[in-house]
Image: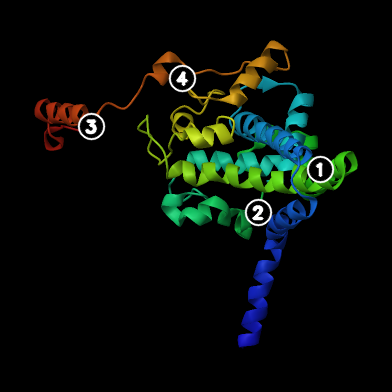
């Protein structure tokens, strides 16, 4: 009986081998190739392209529709984002919409409040019950056959990107521009699901645990202003104030000037200024309301 249980346990871990294999390849390959300015250029260049495609494409366009673009450029965004090997475009956007619908509630698949930090960081990605693409949550984009094709062939796209980088730049491009860049993009993106619901400040009184974190904002090109985003999801701008760096938004505004995208949603003044009042003022207001408002028992309804 013990042997059967052991074999079953090994089978459960087999689907996780590619995920951990990429980490091993990144470490061993980077050591074998060595550090150089070429390695740095490949790492930084591919990371920035991937992160922009994730933040502008997967997140702000496919999940939230905060700007408009052509069918051709939406395909380009999806293709670039899928170089990050975070599963398919429809899968990603559908799961993210569910996250906002049930943020930090039991139905939220990656809530630190509900299932702990490490499960919210990457454990949910390895959990086979979350591997399904919920088309009912993403019907607006599932109508495009090219996006459905990309979503079905996510592993092929990731392998193709690695092959392309190797063809262009050899082993340095493969290990630093693909594997190391991939692992960095994975975990920094995952930090928005985990760390951005644990560490940072809260400007707005959302019902979830979302937080603004300037360190994550720099690393993710603007996604770290997570409390801002949960306060007002319709905006393509997540850094609500001039000092809140949001590189993805700046690039989208340039693309809007070039007529590649359009209707890039900003933040209305009344939304931005709806800040939490200091705790003392909230307590004083609550006390005033309690004094002047009728009790529930006196309500004729």
Q: Nearer the viewer, mark 1 or mark 4?
A: 1
Residue 249 x, y percent position in the rendering: 59, 22
**Dot 4: few (<14), some (14–19), or many (≥20) neighbours within 10 Å?**
few
Residue lying at 59% horizontally and 43% vertically, measured from the top left: 188
Which residue position is annotated with label 3?
A: 279
Q: Nearer the viewer, mark 2 or mark 3?
A: 3
State the separation of the CA atoms marked 2 and 1.
Answer: 30 Å
State the separation of the CA atoms marked 1 and 4.
Answer: 37 Å
Q: Mark 2 or 1 closer to N-term?
A: 2
**Dot 2: few (<14), some (14–19), or many (≥20) neighbours within 10 Å?**
few
Q: Mark 4 or 2 closer to N-term?
A: 2
Q: Secondary structure at mark 3?
A: helix
State the separation of the CA atoms marked 2 and 3.
Answer: 42 Å
Which residue position is annotated with label 1?
A: 173
Which residue position is annotated with label 2?
A: 131
Q: Is residue 102 visible?
A: no
In the image, 39: left or right of 136?
A: right
Farthest residue, direction bottom: 1
**Dot 1: few (<14), some (14–19), or many (≥20) neighbours within 10 Å?**
many
Which residue position is annotated with label 4?
A: 241
In the image, 166: left or right of 4?
A: right
């Amino acid at each position: 009986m013990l042997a059967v249980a052991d074999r079953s346990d090994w089978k459960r871990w087999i689907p996780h081998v590619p995920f951990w294999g990429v980490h091993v390849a990144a470490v061993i390959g980077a050591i074998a190739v060595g550090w150089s300015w070429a390695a740095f250029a490949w790492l930084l260049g591919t990371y920035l392209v991937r992160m922009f495609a994730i933040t502008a494409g997967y997140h702000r366009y496919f999940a939230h529709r905060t700007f408009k673009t052509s069918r051709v450029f939406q395909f380009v965004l999806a293709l670039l984002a899928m170089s990050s090997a975070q599963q398919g475009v429809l899968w990603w956007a559908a799961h993210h919409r569910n996250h906002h619908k049930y943020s930090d509630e039991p139905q939220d698949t990656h809530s630190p409040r509900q299932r702990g930090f490490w499960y919210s960081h990457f454990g949910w990605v390895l959990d086979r019950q979350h591997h399904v693409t919920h088309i009912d949550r993403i019907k607006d984009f599932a109508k495009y056959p090219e996006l459905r094709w990309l979503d079905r062939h996510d592993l092929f796209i990731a392998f193709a990107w690695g092959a392309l980088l190797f063809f262009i730049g050899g082993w340095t491009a493969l290990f630093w521009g693909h594997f190391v860049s991939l692992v960095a993009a994975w975990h920094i993106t995952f930090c928005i699901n985990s760390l951005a619901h644990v560490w940072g400040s809260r400007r707005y009184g959302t019902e979830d645990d979302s937080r603004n974190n300037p360190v994550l904002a720099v690393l993710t090109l603007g996604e770290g202003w997570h409390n801002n985003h949960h306060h007002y999801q319709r905006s393509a701008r997540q850094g609500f104030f001039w000092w809140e760096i949001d590189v993805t938004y700046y690039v989208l505004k340039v693309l809007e000037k070039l007529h590649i995208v359009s209707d890039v949603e900003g933040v209305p003044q009344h939304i931005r200024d709806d800040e939490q009042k200091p705790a003392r003022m909230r307590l004083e207001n609550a006390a005033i309301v309690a004094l002047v408002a009728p009790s529930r028992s006196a309500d004729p309804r």
